[in-house]
Image: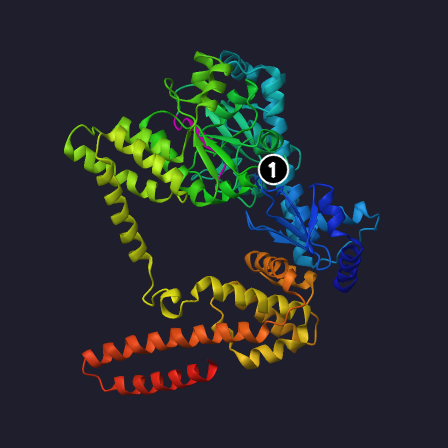
Amino acid sequence: MLDNTSYNDFVERVYSSSDILKVVSSYVSLKKRGHNYWGCCPFHRENTPSFSVVPDEGFFYCFGCHKGGNVFKFVSLIENISYGEAIRLQAERLNIPIPQKKKSAIQVKKEQEIKSLYKIHEMAQNFFHNCLTKTGYGKPGILYLQKRGINKEIIEKFHLGFAPPGWDKLSSAFIKRGINVELLLQVGLIVKKKSGGHYDRFRERLIIPIADEKGQPVGFGARTLGNDQPKYLNSPETALFNKRRLLFGLNEAKKFIRHQEYSIVVEGYMDAIALASSGICNTVASLGTAFTVEQCKKLMRYSPNIYFCYDSDAAGQLATIRALSIAHGSGANVKVITLPDGKDPDEFIRKHSASAFTKLIDEALNFIDFHLYHIVHTIDYTALEGKLKAVTLILPVLASVDNSVESNGYIIRTAQTLGIDETDLRSELQKHQRKSKHSNLPVIKSMKSIDGTGNDAIIKAGRYIISKIWREPDIVDYIMASISMDEFTDKNHREILSYTVRQAADHEPVSDITASELLSDTAYTELSRCIVENENNAETDLLDDYLKTIHLSYLKKSYLEHSLRADELERKGDNGFQQELREIQRIIKEMDGVN
């Protein structure tokens, strides 16, 4: 076992031995342009290169999807592994021996507990699977699966199982094998009786193991074969089983999602299994819960393109709209596969065919088209009241389109579909956009309207200053003497600056390794952008100009704040407005000095 200092030395050795340009080039075709190397980003689809690597600094950044970091961050993203696993993988590639980092007693205990949870889930998966495939208990499950067209290959692929009848078949078998009752209760395989004792949670149900991305079982879904309620019974939330973060089938689907460049999200386990058995293997299910931001981000690691195919009933369509909002808001490219008949994808494929479903994929509706489709099929827009309701629903969707050519096309199509005047629709859209813009404005107006620089100029100045500190850490005292931390409007910039100030105070160097450990993910990514974006300015001294830009912007913001406060106090008859006026005069004098 090594102490933490020795482990940190190991990480530094791997880092210093790693050539980020060589590593990235093994995945991405790069061409040198200026000081940087450029290529098409491997993390999102693009035709024009926006992905840049700065070998001398050891950073990469994509100006399209805003991912960035050092060589370890790149490996973790491209291989979909943790940061620590990326360090170990890079060490293996460089033939550097991997030491064992010293762990505290609490860490060792926690790891042992997690290992026990994984082990018991694997044991339970094997128990249910053997019951289905090797005992007479599983006959009802086999007949049910055959009826739904699920063959042996799919049974093995998803490790499907069957919970035998009786109150204690699993618990008795596991207790005999030395498994602690408390552990069985903790993972929800058994349930406490009010009168004392316990019973098996799953009985006479088809068992669908739910695995994490690595394929390790972490929970179970259990479907009744009769009329028992609920239709599906799931494992309770545990340290391993969090429905908001898990997607059924992702461990099997991820390689197909990457290859086909899109994922299909369905509502139920059997929908995902049915599609996989028909050769449509890039499918996942959202565990019967509403689609979440966490699930969306997980899918977007493999492809930014997400197709939803929920049930065609009213509840399924409302769930689709909610899911679209989450995915679209997270930056995904979304489409909807609409089912002309049949309640769900499983039923549609059994009634028609896999090729018929593939055709529906090709005809999938985009974000705008689906909303229009849904409005047309749920609202009677022939009357005035219906038209008003339809327009109210479609306006926020139309307002979300940034591209003016695309927006114009949708306005024309919407007006024609709803039978309304195109000019009237454009007028209402403009009103909606003005109202939304006004409602989102803070009390203090846009900085652009105050001093003509705009927030972009402030962010640009902040990025230059951070890149300057990174390359010349000794100037941090000069910068902090010139302006205060609060004058930086971006919270990530403040976090990065706080890190550099702490390192200077502790007489510790700023380094990529410590920054990746001490900064939040968003701040570390922003640091990457600061370095990459200002590589061409590395030898240009713009520091004083940018410090002036930030300080002047801060003063003008303060001027407006005190002016508004003075006006308010004067209207109330409060003599405090005179103090505000004196502060305003002080700010004006300081602004004159800066100018």
Closest to the observer, 352 or 343: 352
Q: How many marks?
A: 1
Residue 253 in the image, given as x and y percentages of width and height = 58, 30
The rendered magenta stretch, by its main secondary structure, is classed as: loop
> Residue 250: percent from the left, percent from the top?
57, 33
- The reply to whether residue 490 is visible in this rendering is no
Can you give x and y, in whole percent of width and height, for residue 74 in the image? 67, 48
Disc 1 is placed on an element classified as: loop
Q: Which residue is mark 1?
A: 213
Q: Is residue 11 left or right of residue 424?
A: right
Relative side of 539 to 431, left or right: right
**Where is 342 relative to 504, above or below?**
above
Residue 252 pos. (x, y %): 61, 30
Q: Quadrant of residue 347?
A: top left
Q: Amino acid at mark 1?
A: Glu
Magenta residues, start to end:
229-236
Vertical placement of residue 398 versus 68, above or below: above
Q: Is residue 323 above or below residue 472?
A: above
Would you say 67 lies left or right of 486 here? right
Which residue extends farthest left? 384
Whether residue 262 sits left or right of residue 347 in the image: it is: right
**Residue at 55% over, 47% down:** 64
